[in-house]
Image (cartoon, rainbow, N blue to C red):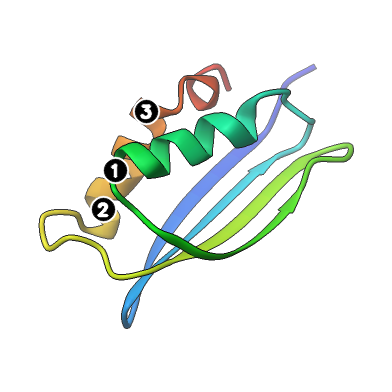
C-alpha cells in the first residue's frame, strides 16, 4: 500500500504557512517537524495538528529571515525532517 505525502509552504504577508498531510499516522513525525522548524529558527505562532488515523499539520509562523524564502524553506524542511524523506 502506497502512502501519500503532501508538503506545502506559502509565504504570508508577515510569515509563512506550512501544511503537511500524510494519509497514515507516522509516529515521531510531529516531533521531527517541530525540531526542523526550531533548527531553522522559525517561530510557530499557531498550529492545528491531527495525528489520529492520518497526520495533518497546518502551522503559521512569524516573520522569516530574509535569507529564507518559501521556495527555499520547503527543501530545507524536508531535508531536516528525516521521516518526511521516507514517504
For the residues carrying marks 1 and 3, which lies nearer the camera in this image?
1
Find residue 71 and name its label.
2
The residue that disc 1 covers is 40
Sequence-first tag of 2 and 1: 1
For the residues carrying marks 2 and 3, which lies nearer the camera in this image?
3
Image side of residue 40 versus residue 22, left or right: left
User: Are there few (<14), some (14-19), or many (20+) residues within 10 Å of tag 1?
Assistant: some
Residue contact between numbered discs 2 and 1, judged by CB atoms under 8 Å: no
Q: Secondary structure at mark 1?
A: loop
The span from disc 1 to disc 3 (Cα, nearest Å) is 9 Å
- Res 16 → quadrant: bottom left
The span from disc 2 to disc 1 (Cα, nearest Å) is 14 Å
Q: Secondary structure at mark 2?
A: helix
The residue that disc 3 covers is 80
Q: Secondary structure at mark 3?
A: helix
Quadrant in the picture for the C terminus: top right
Sequence-first tag of 1 and 3: 1
Amino acid at each position: 500500500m502506497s502512502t501519500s505525502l503532501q508538503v506545502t509552504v506559502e509565504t504570508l504577508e508577515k510569515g509563512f504557512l506550512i501544511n503537511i498531510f500524510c494519509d497514515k499516522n507516522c509516529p515521531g513525525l510531529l516531533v521531527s517537524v517541530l525540531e526542523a522548524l526550531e533548527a531553522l529558527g522559525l517561530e510557530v505562532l499557531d498550529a492545528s495538528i491531527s495525528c489520529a488515523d492520518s497526520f495533518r499539520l497546518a502551522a503559521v509562523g512569524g516573520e522569516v529571515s530574509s535569507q529564507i524564502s518559501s521556495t527555499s524553506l520547503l527543501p530545507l524542511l524536508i531535508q531536516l525532517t528525516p521521516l518526511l524523506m521516507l514517504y
